[in-house]
Every structure is written in structure tokens, then in C-alpha cells.
Image (tube, rainbow, N blue to C red):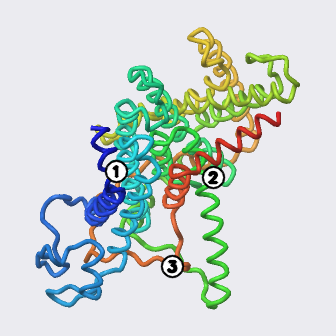
């Protein structure tokens, strides 16, 4: 098959890129359906494409990209205008499919196809998040598991191409699983710490699962880069929004009122106004942080070399952080997989944070005995912090503050009067999901090489 591909590519070098672009435009048309119907709880198969007035759309009026311009953005049946976002998504998908082909086809056509699936997930999650401020679990939990499965079937997805398929598959599985665990746990710990400091929700739980899915396709480096890349994109958006406000003289608009948000606010009003502070979760969170700090000041606690103290400390911190994120991520992902089919909360947040504390205190890569010692230290630290928190609360004698991890609220499927998407502009608040997706795209389509080159220079300098 590879010889046939090489022969066709040698004679017709434009053939496969054109196929990739056309295929991407067709998939983009399908993604428009997914973006509208999945949040509404509708089937993505039936009925077929139809106008908002109810009339079916003929095939010749449903040609990706071209039909919108031929019809001048209006439906043939009733003359109703429809958004330019539809051909834009079709064009965007075609462009990204083409980029995946040019980037990965020579390395591995299988990786190029996996990349096309990955960018399709990112596009769906981005525009659903823009419209409804949510990312459905199908694009996070389930596609995260699909990413792990693809890493076994296509080891080239994570650069494992030694020629021994079994060895490559195992290595790729390890990379993907680490990315899933570390990506989701990193965002979760950032959210936990920010909520304790700011006393309010800092990041949606959908973002936690979304970064885990990114890690399953890109590895833990891609997950981390999506977070920091997303933060940079968010900062740029904020600056542009401020400039736009100064030029146009318009104040920044208030957040959009979505049906899901309205339902969530209504349910939140019915919930107890002052839930009890989760002391165990806060104590386990503090124990995890304490484990990382202890690793810095006592690098001998971890395997170290005869390097300068600062390098040994940094190495110990990396080991502790890796253990913290792997422990939390493993428990979190297992809990989510169990909770999703049950459709109810099953895993207490303190189980996730305590697993992270165990990883922070243990030499997790040295086996079960090291994990047992880490569990002992984590339990002692958690118990000590728990006693301190209780004593402080008793001295203050104040009402309990809100829980740092509010229980997720199940929301019914939303519906819309028509299929017109929300307009995007500098006067609206943008969720973090699209920024994470942009950061992941930058890494996946070439940013990994920049980062690898940077760290190679950094390591050589040390």
C-alpha cells in the first residue's frame, strides 16, 4: 500500500492534498450539524439537513463553502439569511486537514488521519463552547479514551517509530496515558488553588476534561502548552478587546445569557446558600503542595546526582510534581469513566487531591514500597493540616465558607428557536475552551518542534 501511495504521489503530487482539502470541507459541513445538534440533544444523523423553516436542503444547495456564496447567504426556499460561520467552519476544517496532511503524511499517513480527527474534535468543542459555554463529555471523556486507543493502534501519533510495533504501541500508550492524567490533573489543581485564593470558581470542570483529552492526543507536553498557549491567546484577546473599546467607544458587553446558564443559576438558588467547608479536601490539597515544597528543600528525599544543589532541587520538584499530577489524574479519570454512565457523582474531590499528595511525597517510579511510604507521609501531612484548619476555624468562629469544589450540576439539553449561531465580537466574554484549542493546535501542528529545540538548548546550557 505504501508503494502505491509513493507511486501516485510521485506522478500526481497534488492529488492527495486536494483529496485532504475536499474531504475536510465535507467533514466541516458535518461538523456544522454536530455543533448545532449535540448541545440540543438531537440526532446528528436524522433528519437530514434542513432549513430553519423546515424544508429539506437539496444536495446542490449543500455544497461545502460554495453554496453559501452561490446563494449569497440566503436559503433558496424561504430567503432566510444564515450565518457566514457555516462556510467559515467548512473552510477552516479543510485548511486544517490540509495542514495535517502536509505536516504528517511523509512521517505517517496514519498520524495525519489521527490529526484530522483531533482537529475536528477541537473545532466542535470550540464552537459549542462559544455558543453554550459548555463542552459536552463526548468531546472530552470519550474522545480522550479514543485518543488513548489510537495511540496503541497508531504509535506514530506520539512519535514512536522504532520498527517494533509491539514496543512502539506500549511506549505510545504510556505517553498518551501520561498526557491524559497530567493534563486533566494540572488544570484541576490550578482550579482548586485558584478557588481557595479567589473564593470563587476559577475554571470550569469541562476545561479539566478537555485538557485531558488534548493530552491523550498530544502527550503531557501538549497539554501543558495548550494551557499556557491558551493563556497567551486569552491575554491577546483581552488586549484587542480593550483597544476595540477605546476605538469604538463601546463598553465591554456583559456575558451572554445562555439557557444552560439560566438553569444553572436557578438550581444554584435552590441549593443551600452556605455549604460546609470541605476540610478534608483542603487538607489534602495543602498536603500535595507541602510535598512539592519539601522536595525542593530536601532533594535527598528523591534520587539525586552529584549535581549542584539547585539542580538537584529542581529535579526533585519535577519528580514530586509528576507524581502529584499522575496520582490525581489517574484517580480523576477512573472516577469520570465510572461516573459518566451512572450519571451521578461518585468520586469525592478529596480522593483526587489525596492521591496527588501521595504522588508528591513518593518516589512513584520506584514501585509499591515507595508509594506506601508516600501514602504514610501524605496521611500525616493531611491529618496535620486538617487539625490546623479546624483550629483556625474554631478561633475565628465564623460561618463556614463555600466549598472549593462545587458539585457539578446536571443540565438538561438546551434548545434554540433556530439554527443561527451566536455572533462573535470583541464585546463578548469568550470561554477558555477555544483558547485551549488554539494552544493545542499550535503545539500539534509544529509547536512541539520549537519547544523541543528550546529545551534542548536549555539542557545543553546547563
Using residue 87 as the reference point, say whether residue 185 is left or right of it: right
Q: Which mark is residue 425?
A: 3
Q: Residues under labels 3 and 1: Cα distance?
A: 42 Å
Can residue 270 be seen? no
Q: Label 1 belongs to which residue?
A: 9
Q: Quadrant of residue 52?
A: bottom left
Toward which corner of the image does residue 76 lie, by quadrant? bottom left
Real-space CA distance between mark 2 and mark 1, rounded to the nearest whole angstrom: 38 Å
Residue at 62% across, 46% down: 190
Q: Earlier in the sequence, mark 2 or mark 1?
A: 1
Residue in the foreground of this view, choosing between 121 and 377: 121
x then y, percent, for residue 48? 13, 66
Say which of 170 and 256 sits in front. Answer: 170
Work out which quarter of the rendered image holds the N terminus and state it. Answer: top left
Q: Are marks 2 and 1 in contact (CB under 8 Å)?
A: no
Residue 155 visible in rendering: yes
Q: If you read the primary sequence from the N terminus, does the residue marked by circle 3 or circle 1 appear first?
A: 1
Disc 3 crowd rating (10 Å Cα; few below 14, some 14-19, many 20+) is: few
Residue at image coords 66%, 78%: 242
Residue 245 lies, in percent from the top left, at 63, 84
Identify which residue, 219 or 260, lies in the foreground: 219
Say which of marks 2 and 1 sits in front. 1
Give the label on residue 228, or none.
Answer: 2
Residue 145: percent from left, percent from top: 37, 37
Give neighbour class at mark 1: few <14, some 14-19, many 20+ (Cα, 10 Å): some
| Residue 189 percent across, percent down from the top left | 60, 41
Query: Callout 2 environment at 10 Å: few (<14), some (14 to 19), or many (20+)?
Result: some
The alpha-carbon separation of the residues under discs 3 and 2 comes to: 23 Å
Amino acid at each position: 500500500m505504501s508503494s502505491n501511495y509513493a507511486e501516485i504521489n510521485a506522478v500526481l503530487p497534488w492529488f492527495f492534498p486536494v483529496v485532504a482539502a475536499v474531504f475536510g470541507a465535507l467533514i466541516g459541513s458535518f461538523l456544522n450539524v454536530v455543533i448545532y445538534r449535540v448541545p440540543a440533544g438531537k440526532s446528528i444523523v436524522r433528519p437530514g439537513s434542513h432549513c430553519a423553516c423546515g424544508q429539506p436542503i437539496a444536495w446542490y444547495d449543500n455544497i461545502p463553502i460554495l453554496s453559501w456564496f452561490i446563494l449569497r447567504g440566503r436559503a433558496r426556499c424561504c430567503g432566510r439569511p444564515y450565518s457566514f460561520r457555516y462556510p467559515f467552519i467548512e473552510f477552516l476544517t479543510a485548511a486544517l486537514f490540509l495542514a495535517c496532511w502536509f505536516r504528517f503524511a511523509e512521517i505517517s499517513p496514519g498520524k495525519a488521519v489521527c490529526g484530522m480527527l483531533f482537529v475536528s474534535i477541537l473545532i466542535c468543542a470550540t464552537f459549542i463552547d462559544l455558543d453554550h459555554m459548555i463542552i459536552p463529555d463526548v468531546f472530552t471523556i470519550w474522545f480522550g479514551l479514543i485518543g488513548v486507543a489510537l495511540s496503541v493502534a497508531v504509535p506514530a501519533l506520539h512519535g514512536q517509530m522504532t520498527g517494533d510495533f509491539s514496543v512502539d504501541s506500549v511506549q505510545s500508550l504510556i505517553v498518551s496515558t501520561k498526557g491524559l492524567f497530567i493534563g486533566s490533573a494540572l488544570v484541576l489543581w490550578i482550579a482548586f488553588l485558584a478557588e481557595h485564593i479567589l473564593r470563587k470558581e476559577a475554571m470550569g470542570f469541562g476545561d479539566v476534561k478537555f485538557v485531558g483529552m488534548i493530552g491523550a492526543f498530544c502527550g503531557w507536553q501538549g497539554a501543558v502548552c495548550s494551557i499556557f498557549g491558551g493563556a497567551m491567546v486569552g491575554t491577546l484577546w483581552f488586549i484587542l478587546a480593550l483597544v476595540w473599546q477605546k476605538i469604538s467607544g463601546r463598553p465591554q458587553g456583559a456575558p451572554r445569557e445562555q439557557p444552560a446558564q439560566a438553569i444553572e443559576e436557578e438550581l444554584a438558588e435552590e441549593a443551600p446558600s452556605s455549604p460546609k467547608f470541605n476540610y478534608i479536601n483542603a487538607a489534602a490539597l495543602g498536603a500535595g503542595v507541602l510535598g512539592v515544597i519539601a522536595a525542593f528543600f530536601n532533594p535527598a528525599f528523591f534520587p539525586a546526582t552529584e549535581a549542584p544543589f539547585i539542580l538537584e532541587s529542581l529535579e526533585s520538584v519535577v519528580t514530586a510534581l509528576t507524581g502529584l499530577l499522575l496520582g490525581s489524574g489517574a484517580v480523576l479519570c477512573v472516577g469520570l469513566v465510572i461516573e459518566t454512565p451512572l450519571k451521578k457523582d461518585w468520586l469525592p474531590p478529596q480522593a483526587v487531591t489525596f492521591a496527588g499528595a501521595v504522588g508528591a511525597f513518593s518516589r512513584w517510579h520506584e514501585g509499591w514500597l515507595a508509594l506506601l511510604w508516600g501514602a504514610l507521609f501524605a496521611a500525616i501531612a493531611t491529618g496535620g493540616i486538617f487539625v490546623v484548619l479546624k483550629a483556625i476555624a474554631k478561633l475565628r468562629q465564623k460561618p463556614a465558607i463555600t466549598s472549593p469544589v462545587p458539585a457539578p450540576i446536571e443540565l438538561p439539553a438546551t434548545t434554540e428557536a433556530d439554527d443561527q449561531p451566536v455572533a462573535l465580537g470583541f464585546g463578548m466574554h469568550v470561554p477558555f475552551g477555544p483558547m485551549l484549542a488554539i494552544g493545542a493546535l499550535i503545539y500539534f501542528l509544529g509547536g512541539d518542534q520549537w519547544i523541543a529545540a528550546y529545551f534542548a538548548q536549555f539542557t545543553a546550557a546547563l
